[in-house]
Image (cartoon, rainbow, N blue to C red):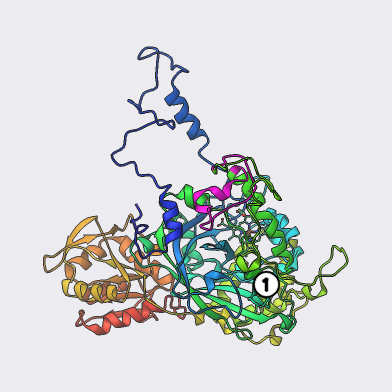
Amino acid sequence: MSKDRSRDPQRPGGKDEQLEAYRVDDGGQRLTTNQGLRVTEDEHSLKAGERGPTLLEDFHLREKITHFDHERIPERVVHARGFGAHGYFQVYESMAPYTTAKFLQDPAAKTPVFVRFSTVAGSRGSADTVRDVRGFATKFYTEEGNYDLVGNNMPVFFIQDAIKFPDLIHAVKPEPNNEIPQAATAHDTFWDFVGQNTESAHMVMWAMSDRSLPRSFRMMEGFGVHTFRFVNAQGEGHFVKFHWKPTLGVHSLVWDETQKIAGKDPDFNQRDLWDAIESGTYPEYEFGVQMIPEDEEFSLGFDILDPTKLWPEEQVPVKIIGKLTLDRNTDNFFAETEQVAFHPGHVVPGIDFTNDPLLQGRLFSYTDTQLTRIGGPNFHEIPINKSVAPVHNNQRDGMHRMTINRGPVSYHKNALAGGDPSPAPAEEGGYAHYAEKVEGRKVRQRSDSFKDHFSQATLFWNSMSPPEKRHIVSAFRFELGKVKNKDVRQRVVDMLGQIDGALASQVAEGIGALPPAHSGGSEVTRPAPALSMANTMKSAKTRKVAVLAADGADDASLSAHLEAWKAAGMVPEIVSVKLGYLASDAEREIEVSHTFLTADAVLFDAVYVVGGRQSVDALLAEPKAADFVKEAFVHYKPIGATGEGTELLAACGTKMPVEGAPGVVVEQGDAAGDGFSGAFIEAVAAHRHWDRQV
Ligand code: HDE
């Protein structure tokens, strides 16, 4: 159960107080029907005789089963699998020069938020660690109404116009004749779509990079993707791109690991977020904006309305303006995470749209989809969606209406109710649309300025570190290797040729295709370092370390290192041959968290093998212990060993030269010394040691 932080007076008021009215605890209560009738019995249906037929009269049975029959609602057509948490947002400095948005004015004010992270393609029950884009949707409960920033963990998108979205999603989802494959782009229809729609080239590079395998929701960036508008009190506009930057940096898993985790712990990312919040290490993301004054719309050399383009941070710096903290898990997954309804069209004064043709179509889709998913037009009344700003209008009735509107008047304009509710002028917080001048012929066309599909894909490729490039090539080889149609494979290779000839040739070689007919652009684009995860923040904080130990483990080492690592924010957990307690060589009882059956190296960030003769002998006798180390090794994870613990590294075999490899920290002698602890923390902070030969 989530800790009851909702009553914490430090938490921002409005939303939590509002939710409190709906929370129900059953402790000490009697069981009732939905009509409040107390029930004497809940295990036997009403029958004519003990062995006789069940009676239709049994209202309790009927109600219980009917409700159960309707417990599910349709899953989201995209982003079906998601995980939500509550928190708050605080701005660092007033953004008044750029926007009137009230929640971006006062650094002392905390705005409550609800965030839902998601995968895109898989069904609700699919695994967390599939190769996919991640959704990062934030609902700010502001005093001026709800503001939803419905973004992804990649800054660009597959298509330029919303009219192509159903086609993209039909191509990416399981193929309709056999509903295969689940939660994967590695099939013919997706790559056929890409080959036929080269505007996807840039996004496909992101999707094949490690960005689509996040280690944690806490370690991925978020992007608003589209160009939005800030509008200040003088009515002046700035084009703006939104960013979330995790304070722990951006880190990923490796492909082989993600596939194993999908079996060992399909809820890996969800569990990680839940556990972090429960343990009080609250995930944090800084909020950043890139801004361009209205009159510099054409200054970047590409069209800023094109959602397949990012604004290189080296060209337009990201100004960090605030921080999001997630500090409370949900009380009820369905009521909160499943029923939350986001919409990029939920804006507040000071934030406006642009003519990005992808954004424009989204503005229609999100309310429309809730009508089916949540079953009617009153989803805004569901507690998680309800605005903290009061709602007054003449909309009435519909499925599941909660509000009891009084009086005979439900129209505007009226005299009978004194003209209320009355529209608010802008000075009183009424939303004033940015008065953009628009002129043009009615055409089904795209501007020529959207025709460059490759230069930023090349920029992305050129900005990758060597290991990132290797991973991208492998990802393409894997995905296209699963494609059965050879023409589709070849077409994608030819498309990659337009991004970079070497990339295309390497991919072609792995999938039995021909090198690309033409190759384009690599020399023209200088790298943009901010795109590479190699340049991200490095920290050992919240990293999980598997401590392999058994009875007789070296007490001095355990005491010294585990304390130092906890102080550095790491999370060491004992993995042993059996559950319960182990006795250290100083006869201290130490609780075991996992066994070699319940845990696996893929579920940890690092491994440490502690010394102690008896302990290490027990580990050497358990084949899964050496396998654990080997698995961590091939996934480039930090490995530490002290005293006799180093023998387990040697037991990995000569084909796996663990000792002496990068990121492997050992100490044979004074095992409890500070030197080892610190060196291991550094190795953990580096996350992965790509220069290791595996
Ligand atoms: Fe979405 N998208 N989308 N999308 N999207 C939905 O809305 C849609 C797009 C994003 O956690 C749906 O309530 C269209 C871009 C997130 O509940 C649906 C187009 C971006 C979420 C929908 C796009 C997103 C959704 C499905 C092209 C990144 C999950 C259920 C014009 C900026 C929100 C729902 C949550 C969900 C439509 C493109 C992000 C069908 C038509 C670009 C994070 O309305």
Question: In the rendering, at what x and y percent does residue 372 appear?
Answer: 63, 44
Q: Mark 1 — residue?
A: 202
* Rendered image quadrant of residue 446: bottom right
Q: Is residue 386 magenta?
A: yes
Which range is magenta?
375-402
Is residue 2 a member of the stretch shown in magenta? no
Whether residue 610 is situated above or below residue 148 in the rendered picture:
below
Picture residue at 69% right of the left edge, 61% below the top: 191
Depth check, front residue: 29 or 277: 29
Judge from the rendering whether residue 355 lies leftward or rightward of residue 57; answer left or right. Answer: right
- Label 1: few (<14), some (14–19) or many (≥20) C-alpha neighbours in 10 Å: many
Q: Is residue 91 above or below residue 46?
A: below
**Residue 125: percent from left, percent from top:** 51, 49
How many labels, in total? 1
The quadrant of the picture showing ligand 1 is bottom right
Q: Nearer the viewer, residue 663 or 321?
A: 321
- Using the rendered image of the protein, determine whether residue 485 is visible from the camera's viewpoint: no
Quadrant of the image containing the C terminus: bottom left
Q: Type of residue at label 1?
A: His
